[in-house]
Image (spheres, helix red, strand yellow):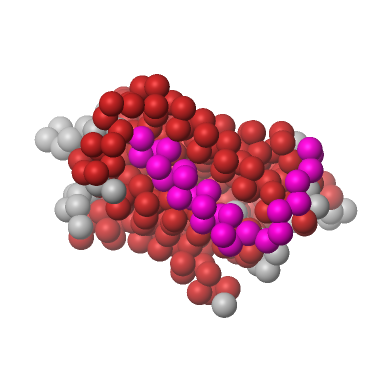
Amino acid sequence: MNALFLLLIIVSISTQHVCKKNWGKKNPEGTLTFSAASALLATLTVTVFSEKFVFSPSIIIYAVIFAASYSLALIFSVLALKEGPLSLTCLFTQYSLIIPTFYGLIFLSEEKKNEIVDSAKKNSLFIGLFFLLISIILVNFEKKDEKKITLKWALYTFISFLGNGICSTSQKLAGSNLAKEHKSAFMISAFIIIFSSLLLFSLFFERKKALPMLKKAPAAPILCGVANGVVNTLVLILSSRMSASVMFPVIASGGIIATAALSVTVYRERLSALQKVGLFFGIASIVFLNL
């Protein structure tokens, strides 16, 4: 069952990237409308599959941080996919897993909880960082006749990277500090905040264009929202069944491989030989950083 859940998560992650890419091609100015619509479907999906709702004031701070960072990640990932290739955008977004990893090491002193420091974990961390550096250098190495990665794409991807990282960190903290009966309430509350905020921004900035854009490509936000709800629900389930050091590397690397395959077969995106090698090192770095 765990393997099936992992497969569904990987497929859902790839589905989200494809939906964002398709929406950006058909509605280049509808980022907020897409984000609000997909957030609504994600909220409904999470609510349907969640356990009993038990609210506590202790969940508010976690829900607000999660909602703010999630919204940034969602909006700027859509913008990044408009400007740059699907495979590389997905790769750099998945690098965000290093944020909760370093937060745990620095602020939670996860290594210091053991009397004997795990040298293998330290080694995997350094190897992961080294592979990450190689990946960044190779991915950004381009020949003169190749299309250059734009500064705008880099900025959008970096903000999405930060949003995803903070989102994962807040989710990790909520999972560690909240009682089991409050976890569903945390997730539902967070998504209600996300949808409400994005809806207000959409109505303010894109009100006249919202309905025509949704009519032009209604499937994209629906599929993206449902896929996102599935990912968050299944990750919450698997977090109590699997080790994080196994689950997150499998999800991250699997998502990158699946999205890269789609970018080549469906969108005909071409990476140079060095960028392909960089993609491989990127996948390896994510695995080592989370061992």
Q: Nearer the viewer, residue 185 or 152?
A: 185
Q: Nearer the viewer, residue 8 or 118?
A: 8
Q: Nearer the viewer, residue 227 or 110?
A: 227
Residue shown at 30% from the left, 53% from the top: 219
Residue found farthest to the left: 145
Q: Residue 83: name its quadrant.
A: top left
Residue found farthest to the top: 204
How many discs appear? 0
| Horizontal and vertical percent position of residue 224 | 39, 51
| Horizontal and vertical percent position of residue 45 | 51, 56
Residue shown at 29% from the left, 48% from the top: 218
Span colored in magenta = 33-58
Let me know if residue 206 appears in the view: yes
Q: Quadrant of the N terminus?
A: bottom right
Let me know if residue 136 appears in the view: no
| Horizontal and vertical percent position of residue 195 | 50, 38
Q: Nearer the viewer, residue 238 or 68?
A: 68
Residue found farthest to the right: 115
Q: Residue 180: name its quadrant.
A: bottom right
| Horizontal and vertical percent position of residue 110 | 77, 47
Q: Main secondary structure of the magenta part?
A: helix
Q: Is residue 182 above or below residue 109?
A: below
Q: Is residue 148 above or below residue 276?
A: above
Image-based side of 120 in relation to 136, left or right: right
Image-based side of 107 in relation to 68, left or right: right
Q: Residue 106: name its quadrant.
A: top right
Residue shown at 79% from the left, 39% from the top: 58
* Residue 124: in magenta span: no
* Residue 52: in magenta span: yes
